Image: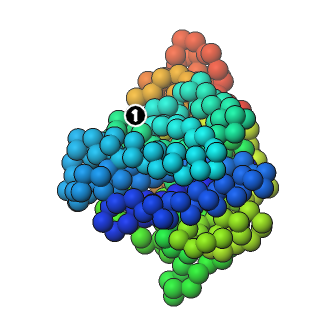
């Protein structure tokens, strides 16, 4: 199988912020054992800021963005040296890939990252992917390596995503472990009250956001498990479930549509009436101007935009055929009236169904 393993900050660093070398060596041994069994392993790692704080012997509390970026730069070097050291004992190479949302916003860059991962696997190297905290200001605020792990899982057609952290999985409001989730609904989100720590600015909700897209769109099961316990990865690879598993739908979408769903943040949004929402969700139709109430934001032709209902809830994403100015002018009119409004009609639809993904 092809398995993406995301290593959380709290798994890699101790309470003091220093890297936990014993934990990292055990994890790399477990990853190596899976590779020996014939599995392809891709690692998404957090911990750069925490590692940097450990090296500098400073607290992560109250670090401003400028200092946090510098600390991440120091910590990233330390983190990769540790991975290199332990994988070298197994006679394996490590390839580092640093990405930001800007790298994913371009379809070409998105495909280049995918090709690099596959090439590293062909060379027998272990790809270690991390968010480029040194330059990714917005991502640094969000701490969304869970999201990156989901993007990587989608782009490489992985069979499983395993998120290793220091908890066993998702618990309900009574403290009972939820073993299996088939739909990430409001009730499931209500269980996710954790907000992370000073070193790990993500939390359970970011994991649920990742699971929600994966199980809907990509056909890969996602696991949350306690990485402090031995044998967890081997258990999951063998079909077990030591934590919480999010079961994927049978539906699998194309790589192009995965990029639309995952690869970038929308440049703007269009508000739809009830008829358009129904046409997109239930009938797999294109988005026509007659169903649009208004546009928000500044976007150009070809940009990724979000389709929301009247309450502002996102229901789809797609590549627009018209700019925000043009959408504003043709909102609510029939396709046959586009030329009358704009003086031209290059497309009958604002978003063609081939360039649209229901979220």
Whole-percent x, y for residue 225 in the image: 59, 69
Whole-percent x, y for residue 64 in the image: 21, 48
Q: Is residue 290 visible?
A: no
Residue 226 relative to residue 119: left or right = left
Q: Please identify the residue farthest to the bottom as the structure is shown.
A: 174
Tell how many labels.
1
Name the residue at 64% across, 69% down: 232
Quarter of the image where one finds residue 28: bottom right
Q: Nearer the viewer, residue 196 or 343?
A: 196
Q: Please identify the residue farthest to the top as the structure is shown.
A: 343
Residue 126 relative to residue 202: left or right = right
Q: Is residue 247 above or below residue 146?
A: below
Q: Nearer the viewer, residue 307 or 123?
A: 123
Q: Nearer the viewer, residue 33 or 332?
A: 33
Whole-percent x, y for residue 12 in the image: 45, 60
Q: By what rule are the colours in the image chosen? A: rainbow
Label 1 Cα neighbours within 10 Å, binned few <14 / some 14-19 / many ≥20? few
Q: Nearer the viewer, residue 196 or 82?
A: 82
Quarter of the image where one finds residue 340: top right
Q: Is residue 343 above or below residue 60?
A: above
What residue is pinned by disc 1?
297
Q: Secondary structure at mark 1?
A: strand
Q: Is residue 112 visible?
A: yes
Name the residue at 22% across, 44% down: 67
Q: Is residue 73 above or below residue 14?
A: above
Name the residue at 48% across, 65% down: 22
Whole-percent x, y for residue 205 in the image: 48, 63
Name the residue at 39% across, 46% down: 78
């Amino acid at each position: 199988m092809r398995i993406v393993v995301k290593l959380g900050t709290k798994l890699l660093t101790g309470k003091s912020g220093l890297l936990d070398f014993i934990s990292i060596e055990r994890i790399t041994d477990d990853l190596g054992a899976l590779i020996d069994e014939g599995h392809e392993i891709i690692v998404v790692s957090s911990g750069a800021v925490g590692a940097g704080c450990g090296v500098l012997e400073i607290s992560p509390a109250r670090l401003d963005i400028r200092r946090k970026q510098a600390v991440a730069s120091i910590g990233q070097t330390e983190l990769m040296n540790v991975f290199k050291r332990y994988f070298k004992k197994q006679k394996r190479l490590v390839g580092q890939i640093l990405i930001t949302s800007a790298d994913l916003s371009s379809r070409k860059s998105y495909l280049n990252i995918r090709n690099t991962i596959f090439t590293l696997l062909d060379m027998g190297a272990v790809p270690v992917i991390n968010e480029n905290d040194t330059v990714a200001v917005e991502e640094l605020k969000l701490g969304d390596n869970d999201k990156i792990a989901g993007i990587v899982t989608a782009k490489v057609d992985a069979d499983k995503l395993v998120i290793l952290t220091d908890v066993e999985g998702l618990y309900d409001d009574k403290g009972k472990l939820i073993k299996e989730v088939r739909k990430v609904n409001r009730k499931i989100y209500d269980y996710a009250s954790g907000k992370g720590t000073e070193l790990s600015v993500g939390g359970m909700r970011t994991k649920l956001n990742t699971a929600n897209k994966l199980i809907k769109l990509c056909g890969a099961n996602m696991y949350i498990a306690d990485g402090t316990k031995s044998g967890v990865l081997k258990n999951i690879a063998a079909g077990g479930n030591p934590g919480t598993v999010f079961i994927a739908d049978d539906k699998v979408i194309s790589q192009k549509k995965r990029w639309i769903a995952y690869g970038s943040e929308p440049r703007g949004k269009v508000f739809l009436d009830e008829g358009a929402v129904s046409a997109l969700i239930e009938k797999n139709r294109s988005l026509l101007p007659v169903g649009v109430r208004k546009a928000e934001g500044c976007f150009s032709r070809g940009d990724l935009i979000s389709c929301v209902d009247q309450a502002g809830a996102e229901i789809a994403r797609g590549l627009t055929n018209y700019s925000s100015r043009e959408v504003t002018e043709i909102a609510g009119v029939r396709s046959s009236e586009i030329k009358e409004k704009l003086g031209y009609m290059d497309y009958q639809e604002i978003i063609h169904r081939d360039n649209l993904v229901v979220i």
